[in-house]
Image (cartoon, rainbow, N blue to C red):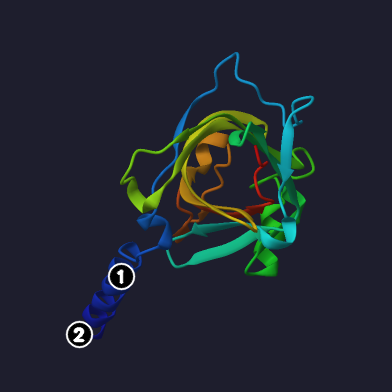
Amino acid sequence: MKSCSLLLALSILTFGAGCRKSEIDQKPAAEVTETSATAATSTEPTSGAVIKKVTKEKSKIEWVAAKVTRDHKGEFKTFDGFIEFVGDQPARIAFDIDLNSVVADEPKLTAHLKSPDFFDVARYPKATFASTSITAAPAGSPGGATHNVNGILNLHGVEKEVTFPVVTLITPDGIRTKSEFTINRHDWGISYKGMADDLIKDNVLMKLNLFFPPPPVM
């Protein structure tokens, strides 16, 4: 009888863990495709272009990852980037992210993320993103998106083309852009499975909250 009760309890726990809701499950996935051979991947500003550099102290690049039992949250502390303008319209965005600056909600995980199991920062110290297009989102887009950004994400030695929605708010103080979307880590060759009884989910949620100076006045 005790044996049956124990089995029932284990079944309930296992079922509950498998059905646990994660913040990741509620967010849209970025569209990911193979990179065009002609896609521009430079994160250097175009010569002579008008740029507005990200205001780092007012910006964050955060992430959420999940395994069977719980979510883990963190951020990248060190990054740089800019918006490039044609007239008063954003034409290009580019970012460099120092992967060694990754911080997780547990020190042990922070160290593990830097290892060859994940980012392998000794070999791949930096991730970059360079947009290839910024277009207005259709009216009524999910999440109030105002723009769709397409570009090349170089991570872990792999380049993929990604498209994700962005909400942009322009005020006299500056430009606030926010975006939340998931990417599949396997697309960039990050495939560590985790413990057999606590597997890591494939998708990772990216949470971008970026602030830039006001656009040029024309």
SS under mark 1:
helix
Residue depth check, mark 2 versus mark 1: number of the one nearer the observer: 1
Identify the residue at the far bottom of this view: 2
**Residue 87's disc number:** none
* Residue at screen point 46% across, 40% down: 147
Amino acid, disc 2: Met
Farthest-out residue, front: 218
| Residue 63 in the image: above or below residue 87 | below
Residue at (73, 38) in percent of width and height: 51
Q: In the rendered view, would you say 213 is above or below 51?
A: below
Q: Position of residue 135 (x, y in %)?
A: 47, 33
Q: Amino acid at mark 1?
A: Gly
Quick one: 9 or 177, which is closer to the camera?
A: 177
Q: What residue do we see at 54% from left, 42% from top?
A: 191
Above or below, comparing residue 102 to residue 140 in the picture: below
Q: Is residue 187 left or right of residue 84?
A: left
Residue nearest the observer in this picture, 86 or 136: 86
Looking at the image, how many numbered discs can be counted on the residues? 2
Q: Earlier in the sequence, mark 2 or mark 1?
A: 2
Instruction: Identify the residue position indicated by label 2 in the image.
Output: 1
Among the 4 quarters of the image, the one containing residue 171: bottom right
Image check: 55 left or right of 142?
right
**Residue carrying label 1:** 16
Q: Position of residue 156 (x, y in %)?
A: 66, 37
Relative image position of residue 185 (x, y in whole percent)? 53, 42
User: Where's residue 4, x and y in %?
Assistant: 22, 78
Q: Residues within 10 Å of mark 2 (few under 14, many from 20)?
A: few
Where the C terminus falls, by quadrant? Answer: top right
State the quadrant of the N terminus.
bottom left
